[in-house]
Amino acid sequence: MERFGFKEKWIGWIKECVTTTSISVLVNGSLTKDFIPDKELRQGLIKGAEIGNNGMNLTDLQFADDTIIFYQADWGKVVNIKRLLRCFKLISRLKINFHTSIVGGVRVDDSLLDDFSLVSNCKAYKFPVKYRGLPLEANPRLKKTWQPVLQKLKSKLASWKRKFLSFGGRLTFVKSVLSALPIYYFLICRVLVAEIDKIRSGFLWRDNDVEKKLHLVKWEKMTKGKEFGGLGLRNIRVMNDAFI
């Protein structure tokens, strides 16, 4: 909390809530005796994976409606994950769709991965895999990695659309579609930012992909807010830096 800039007084409030509050757990419909949590919120069932040079431990990631859990490739950890999901199902009364869940391994023997998938009732996913339309093992610094993103952007710009749209209509289309799509591919290669801006600018000013037309306003000015004389278009480079 200190690293995120929270003040000492606010941190003290949160610490007070966590360390002095008594809680109980619902087991089979009955409450246990009250107890005070005095260790930490996570109890260490999952060791996770170490990443980076500083030995950061990563146990889970969440993005949109996806949750990724990292654990060591041994039977004990697989059983623990299964138990946690089972407890979640009983407490929340929500059914888990294991058919849409996957188990993937990094440097894990294929036969062992298949056994894990049977125990977990999930599909075994072997690399290379795609996430949000992009291959996970690909180098994000290479332009060719991002070709699917460019193709998706261009597919949104069927040539007939711009002919029947006014400038205001094109501006709305650029804001709502072309500026929103890169959010789902937030770690965009910097080289690709210029390509995306070129596509957005071309759709806004040109009638087709063949004829060239003079751009009446610089793109840098158009990405400024309306209060600063711009049109409020999203700056993909700034947005990308913020996500990173």
Image (tube, rainbow, N blue to C red):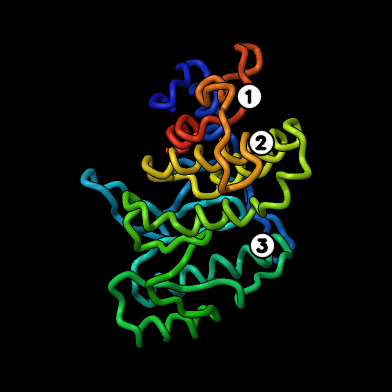
Question: Tag 1's secondary structure?
Answer: loop
Q: For label 1, count other residues whose C-alpha is less than 10 Å away and answer few (under 14), some (14-19) or many (20+).
A: some
**Mark in the foreground, 1 or 3:** 1
Tell me which numbered mark, 3 or 2, is placed earlier along the sequence. Answer: 3
Instruction: Give the distance between the C-alpha atoms of the residues marked 1 and 3, in whole angstroms.
Output: 53 Å
Disc 2 and disc 1 in contact, CB within 8 angstroms: yes
Mark carried by residue 232: 1
Amino acid type assigned to the residue bearing label 1 in the image:
Gly
- Which of the pair 237/114 is nearer the observer? 237
- Which of the pair 200/40 is nearer the observer? 200
Tell me which numbered mark, 2 or 1, is placed earlier along the sequence. Answer: 2
Mark 2 = which residue? 175
Mark 3 = which residue? 27
Quarter-of-image position of residue 183:
top right
Disc 1 and disc 3 in contact, CB within 8 angstroms: no
Amino acid type assigned to the residue bearing label 3 in the image:
Val
**Vertical arrangement, residue 186 with respect to residue 235, above or below:** below
Q: Position of residue 100 (x, y in %)?
A: 60, 73
Identified at 38% across, 26% down, the residue is: 3
Question: Tag 3's secondary structure?
Answer: strand
**Vertical arrangement, residue 230 with respect to residue 113, above or below:** above
Q: For label 3, count other residues whose C-alpha is less than 10 Å away and answer few (under 14), some (14-19) or many (20+).
A: few
- Which of the pair 238/91 is nearer the observer? 238
**Mark in the foreground, 3 or 2:** 2
Disc 3 and disc 2 in contact, CB within 8 angstroms: no
The answer to whether residue 145 of the structure is visible from this angle is yes
